[in-house]
Amino acid sequence: MTYDRSKYKNQFQLIFKEYYNPLCNFAKSILKDSAMAEDAVQDVFTSFWQKNNIDSVDNPKAFLFQSTKNKAFEVLRTKKRMNDYTLSLEQQYGNIKTIEEVSDRYILKEKLFRKIAELPPQCQKILTLSKLNGFTYKEIARELDISVKTVENQIGRGLRLLRVKMAKAL
Amino acid sequence: MNIDRIIGRFLLGQQSQDELHTLEEWKSDAEENLKELQAIQKLWNDSQGLQDYQDFDADSALAKLELSLESSSPTGPANAKIMNFSYVKWISGLAACFLMVFAGYQYMASQETSVIADTKNIVYSLQDGSAIELAEGAKLVISDDQEKNLELDGRAYFEIAKQEDTRLTIDTRFGDIEVIGTAFVVEAAQDYTSVSVVEGTVRLKTSNKEQILTEGMTAMTNGKSLNVKRIDTYNYKSLITGDLQYEGVPLYQVVNDLNRHFGNKLLLGESNSKFECKVSSVFSDLSLEDILKELSLTIGLKFHKKENKYVIDSVSC
């Protein structure tokens, strides 16, 4: 019995650590609020824990993303923040994109996010400003007090490095 | 012409005709170049959706969740008492599985257990929750039921749980190690034994000397002499974590780490190259060849494979 409990807890922790961040970002894309997103994902994992047997969930990734989507829209309804925009968003998620597509997209984002953080400092800074903050090359050059030429060079170099790291991660 | 810069401009469609021509030539030079450019374009497009992507604190969230489940949930799995699980403990949980698959596991005698990492690293856990990761080729013999007397041949990383009564000892060819706690690397080679302490304290005893080693100290002995020096221990955990991190570290030091991590598979060539080039990077669970490929992009490292080893020919940082 002790082994089973310990095994269950290990499994749960591994799943939590793998999916927590992409799930929070997914929830944030619906709720537009980081704190609310974290609360929603905590609720999802609480329910997941109480299922008693993770092995009974065929596809934990799909289960967690589907539960997070449901929870996020439930929060919007409860807080009466459902408006035309969120209604269309719900319709969009309900009709167009399968939960597999959505979850794969967020898992890919998570891997890219983590791998960019592993790049050498200058590449990392420049790719972060470009991809996460949406800066143009000129804005990056001004922000870091370097030439646009250096930015162009570092973007190319950073992406070549990122390709090596992502090839291993995928 | 700098191909990195041309790629950087090409992605925004800002390349000149000359640059486009150079890029076309580069693409046609090798099929690998074409594949690389296609992969880079895909990465560029995939990462468009990263705007506003955030790093939430998963560790704190997990701790908070465990606390709330502990205080409120009689319905948790089998009413399990929530404990703070350390990394070591979940490794311990996985150890049995690892062993079933990868280890040559056999009882040598009624009270003696041998664990051999035949073809890859394996994790073995002791009854007290301690975790031992054996590097490929290492052999561990546990010679008593209480699991307090171990013998090691090869290299291993130890994360030892707090020792209550009897202290754990590890015997090697050239010296015995008494564990006061907690995390350290032992390399018991044919002609020397070395101990590097990442956390806590150990005592190394040879036939004629005794040395207490604390965090950040490494000792090497051949049975006659014993040398002690200070080390940066961060990457000593790599055997367990798979991560190697560098910030402005000279290449020759990185090579030392890689040899420790991968088992002496890397040689510095004989050319008068810049092996003091500084490396800043994070390698997570990469193969040695992937790490060398990455270094070829960052510091212009050139290497070739010779039998089952890699030789670094030159560096152009």
Image (tube, rainbow, N blue to C red):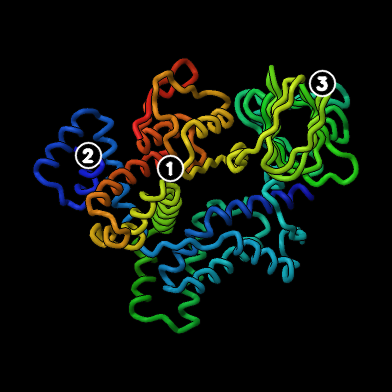
**Res B95 seen here:** no
Does dot 1 land on a helix, a strand or a loop?
loop
Q: Do the numbered discs 1 and 3 sit on residues whose CB atoms are within 8 Å?
A: no
Task: Identify which residue, B65 or A54, lies in the foreground.
Answer: B65
The reply to whether callout 3 and callout 2 are in contact (CB within 8 Å) is: no
Secondary structure at numbered mark 2: loop
Judged by depth in the image, the label closer to the viewer, 3 or 2, is 2
Residue pointed to by mark 1:
A170
Residue at 70% in and 32% down: B228
Category of crowding for the residue at label 2, using alpha-carbon neighbours closer than 10 angstroms: few (below 14), some (14–19), many (at least 20): few
Q: Amino acid at mark 3?
A: Met
Number of labelled discs?
Answer: 3
- Judged left or right of residue A76, residue B234 is right
Q: Which residue is mark 3?
A: B108
- The answer to whether residue A59 is left or right of residue B200 is left
Badge 1 amino acid: Leu
Q: Is residue B269 visible?
A: yes
Q: Which residue is mark 2?
A: B2
Q: Which residue appears farthest toward the bottom when viewing the image?
A: A80
Q: Residue at x 20, y 28 (%)?
A: B29
Examine the rendered structure and indicate whether residue B17 appears above or below residue B64: above
Q: Amino acid at mark 2?
A: Asn
Residue found 29% across the figure and 52% down from its top: B45
In the rendered view, tell whether residue B187 sits above or below residue A92.
Answer: above
Q: Is residue B63 above or below residue B100?
A: below
